[in-house]
Amino acid sequence: MYIFIGLGNPGEQYLSTRHNLGFRVLDALLEKYKNTSSTFWHEDKNLKSMMKTIQIADQNVLLIKPQTYMNLSGKAVQRVMQEYKAKKEDIYVVYDDLDLPVGELRIRREGGSGGHNGVSSIIDMIGEEFYRIRIGIGRPAEAIAIEDYVLQQFSPDELSEIDKVVPQVIKACEELVTHGFETYMSKYYKKL
């Protein structure tokens, strides 16, 4: 089973913010696969998530957008795992990363939260052993609280970089489903 979880905050006011990059990627993934599914998200109040199943290379892939707000993302992830009897290795979390330059993509199997509150919440609820698909948003150039920075919209230059990386993230998701993590890593990260 493949479960891709995009991190973000529900609500129109957060739609285009840096912290909603995980939601943006899942929306783009759903749009690409609209021929195998409708493009409407289904809300499951019990699982505290917007969800949709798509097919990639004959594999069912569950897309999840937690509706708990970022700091409580782990509650939704835990409920989804219980409902679908999923294992930690089924979970791929897509999120924004301050420690990567804008538009840079990194994937890893486990580790800490890097100070990301949504990832911290997931670790608190299920542990560290899940896949991370990290997309750089960079750190603020001027003195601004991180909480304010991540809730701002991208600048036009940043948005240009994000528009370039989203198709790369979708391709990575497809390759993870069709070829697996080890093959993906050996192809794109020769040093590992």
Image (cartoon, helix red, strand yellow):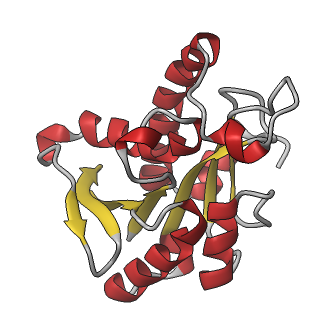
Question: Which residue is found at the position 59% from the left and 36% from the top?
Answer: 18
Judged left or right of residue 182, residue 61 is left
Q: Does 50 sit above or below residue 157?
A: below
Judged left or right of residue 159, residue 12 is left
Quarter of the rendering containing residue 160: top right
Total residue callouts: 0
Expressed as whole percent of the image width and height from the top left, the position of residue 31 reads 25, 35
Judged left or right of residue 123, residue 28 is left
Residue 173 appears in view: yes
Q: Does 125 sit above or below residue 162?
A: below
Question: Which residue is found at the position 27% from the left and 34% from the top?
Answer: 32
Expressed as whole percent of the image width and height from the top left, the position of residue 12 reads 36, 41
Please tell me which residue lies in front, 135 or 109.
Answer: 135
Quarter of the rendering containing residue 76: bottom left
Please tell me which residue lies in front, 2 or 187.
Answer: 2
Judged left or right of residue 95, residue 54 is left
Expressed as whole percent of the image width and height from the top left, the position of residue 30 reads 28, 43
Where's the N terminus, which quadrant? bottom left
Residue 58 appears in view: no
Question: Which residue is found at the position 17% from the left and 43% from the top?
Answer: 39
Expressed as whole percent of the image width and height from the top left, the position of residue 28 reads 35, 35
Question: Which residue is found at the position 50% from the left and 51% from the top?
Answer: 8
